[in-house]
């Protein structure tokens, strides 16, 4: 669905209440247009004016590390949001783009021509704020291979599997480096305090004093850019020890300076004992080659839908995936890690008051400038501080309430959740694959054992509550035969109410033919009623022997006991071609 873009109108802003950034005037005051709420990650259906949610900012998928040498930030802005614009003005009312298909695929063409200076200020603030979060997190993701917990304790040589990690960490707890442990725990406490401070920070009104508003701005900025502040503080502490001639911390070390070279991806690797071919590289990645993209797709769409729901707009999942695909393809030419949406950075972007995807361009520019000129300063950043940043970002993502919710709503769904959760402690890909398999088994079980309602009396009424597919036909046959033949005085007439059946397959047709024959041998008659047109057309095409169908259950009950060859049923009332075929016995 596509709609025309309205033109900005000065002094009106949005009709909805917008969250205010620190020191920011209310939208629509003093002749300044209110900032729009950003739309989907990269397009789709434009949202109505609403709160600023911000475009999804990319981050490395699968916890693998930053986007190569800047992949996490270098792709910022590739997944762009299409902002909602204020009410349309008279000059552009009714106008439409001559190439709507191009606008659909390139959302920048929808918001850039209507960009205003009022939005630029807010986009700059949001871009810089997210950039200060992206740079230290990107460095921290690079240390994920070294495992955050062990970095905090200063341990080395710890295996990747979670259970082995716990065992080795406890066994070697005596080898903990005191400096790294103290600094890491201090950084964790500071990050938790700043997060709590921001969550309890009250909003300020324009009527308050200048000192109160400035204090709010300082506290809000410090809490929002807490990752950068903690890393900066830890780096200064480590540099101070380096100047004094001692170093109690494990440091990040040298990082190559400059932007990554733009070249084709490597399809082989040089190792000390020779060259590793592309086939061996694929075999080493194993299941992760499919799991990482799958997790990236699911996570990106889930984040986009979450912010779309919060801010009253809709997304186009195809456009989201298109943007992520292009970002990963371009990132492969600069040695980037897999890129996907980041919930944390999107939340920071929204809380910073972003208006358009231009905020992502500011973030990307900040990351590129850091790569070009600041990498020498990263040498003194302690690994314990980076580990604290990662742990602080990951812990809030664990939702313990989902266990209680599933226990109340549907306990069976706890099975794939627990299987995935436990096996992810061994290897993430094992947990994902096991969860998918368990979910598939539960899905097949529900299809193979559909709920069937049975009413006994003079007529045996059997009513499946869902569509029938090949795993379910045996369950249906057993139910009909057991109820129809096991009774002391079995009914002479069985009615199969198909009002809830919208589709069947060939195996079901074969099973129904065998059921008709089996009941006929026992002197019973089976009739179908309330058939939907697609199902009726399939059964008529199969030319089943002894097949009777009626428009309703009441009609079938009135005509029960009809001998084969008799009609007596009213025509099947429908507007489809199949309704022209007579009801009753079909030979």
Image (cartoon, rainbow, N blue to C red):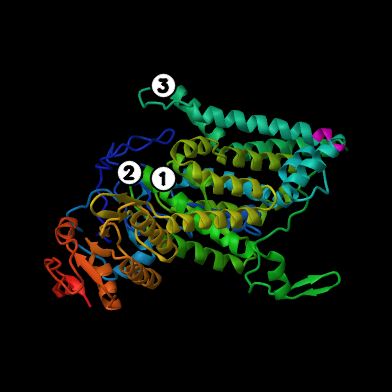
| Residue 481 shows in this picture | yes
- According to the picture, the residue beneath numbered tag 1 turns out to be 53
Picture quarter with the C terminus:
bottom left
Quadrant housing residue 575: bottom left
Q: Of residues 384 and 417, which is closer to you in this image?
A: 417
Residue visible at 15% across and 62% down? 559
Disc 3 versus disc 2: nearer the observer: 2
Q: Is residue 389 above or below residue 87?
A: above
The answer to whether residue 385 is above or below residue 431 is above
Q: Which of 259 and 489 is in front in this view?
A: 489
Question: Which comes sooner in the sequence, label 3 or label 1?
Answer: 1
Q: In which quadrant of the rendered view does residue 182 lie? A: top right
* Residue that mark 2 sits on: 50
100 relative position to 438: left or right? left
Left or right of 318 in this view: 133? right
Residue located at (30% from left, 46% from top): 49
Q: Mark 3 points at which residue?
A: 209
**What secondary structure is the stretch in magenta mostly built from?**
helix
- As helix, strand or loop, the secondary structure at mark 3 comes to loop
User: What's drawn in magenta, residue-wise?
Assistant: 175-179
Q: Earlier in the sequence, mark 3 or mark 2?
A: 2
**Where does residue 176 sit, x and y in percent of width and height?**
84, 36
């Amino acid at each position: 669905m596509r709609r025309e873009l309205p033109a900005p109108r000065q002094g009106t802003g949005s009709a909805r209440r917008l969250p205010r950034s620190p020191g920011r005037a209310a939208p629509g005051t003093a002749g300044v247009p209110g900032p729009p709420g950003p739309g989907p990650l990269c397009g789709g259906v434009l949202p109505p004016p609403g709160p600023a949610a911000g475009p999804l900012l990319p981050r490395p998928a699968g916890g693998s590390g930053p986007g190569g040498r800047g992949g996490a930030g270098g792709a910022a802005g590739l997944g762009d949001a299409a902002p909602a614009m204020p009410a349309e003005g008279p000059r552009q009312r009714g106008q439409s783009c001559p190439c709507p298909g191009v606008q659909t695929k390139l959302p920048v063409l929808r918001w850039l021509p209507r960009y205003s200076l009022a939005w630029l200020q807010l986009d700059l603030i949001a871009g810089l704020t997210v950039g200060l979060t992206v740079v230290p997190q990107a460095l921290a993701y690079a240390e994920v291979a070294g495992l955050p917990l062990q970095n905090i304790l200063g341990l080395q040589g710890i295996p990747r599997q979670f259970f082995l990690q716990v065992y080795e960490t406890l066994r070697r707890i005596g080898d903990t480096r005191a400096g790294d442990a103290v600094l890491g725990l201090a950084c964790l406490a500071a990050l938790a305090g700043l997060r709590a401070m921001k969550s309890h920070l009250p909003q300020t009104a324009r009527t308050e004093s200048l000192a109160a508003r400035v204090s709010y701005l300082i506290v809000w900025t410090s809490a929002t850019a807490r990752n950068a502040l903690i890393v900066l503080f830890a780096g200064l502490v480590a540099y101070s020890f380096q100047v004094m001639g001692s170093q109690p911390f494990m440091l990040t070390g040298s990082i190559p300076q400059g932007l990554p070279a733009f070249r084709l991806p490597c399809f082989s690797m040089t190792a000390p004992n020779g060259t590793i071919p592309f086939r061996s590289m694929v075999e080493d990645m194993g299941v992760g080659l499919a799991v990482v993209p799958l997790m990236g797709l699911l996570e990106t769409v889930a984040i986009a839908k979450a912010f779309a729901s919060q801010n009253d707009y809709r997304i186009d999942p195809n456009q989201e995936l298109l943007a992520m695909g292009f970002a990963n393809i371009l990132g492969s030419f600069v040695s980037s890690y897999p890129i996907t949406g980041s919930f944390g950075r999107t939340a920071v972007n929204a809380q910073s008051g972003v208006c358009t995807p231009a905020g992502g361009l500011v973030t990307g520019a900040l990351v590129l400038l850091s790569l070009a000129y600041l990498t020498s300063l990263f040498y003194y950043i302690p690994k314990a501080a980076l580990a604290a940043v990662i742990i602080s970002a990951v812990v809030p993502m664990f939702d313990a309430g989902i266990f209680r919710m599933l226990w109340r709503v549907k306990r069976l769904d706890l099975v794939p959740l627990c299987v995935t959760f436990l096996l992810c402690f061994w290897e993430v890909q094992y947990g994902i694959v096991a969860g998918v398999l368990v979910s598939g088994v539960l899905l097949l079980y529900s299809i193979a054992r559909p709920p069937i309602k049975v009413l006994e009396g003079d007529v045996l009424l059997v009513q499946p509550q869902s569509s029938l597919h090949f795993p379910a036909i045996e369950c249906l046959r057993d139910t009909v035969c057991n109820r129809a033949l096991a009774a002391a005085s079995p009914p002479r007439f069985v009615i199969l109410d198909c009002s809830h059946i919208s589709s069947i397959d060939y195996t079901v047709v074969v099973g129904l033919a065998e059921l008709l024959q089996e009941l006929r041998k026992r002197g019973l008659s089976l009739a179908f009623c309330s058939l939907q047109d697609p199902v009726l057309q399939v059964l008529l095409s199969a030319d089943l022997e002894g097949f009777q169908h009626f428009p309703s259950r009441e009609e079938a009950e009135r005509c029960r006991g009809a001998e084969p060859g008799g009609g007596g049923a009213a025509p099947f009332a429908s507007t489809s071609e199949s309704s022209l075929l007579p009801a009753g016995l079909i030979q």
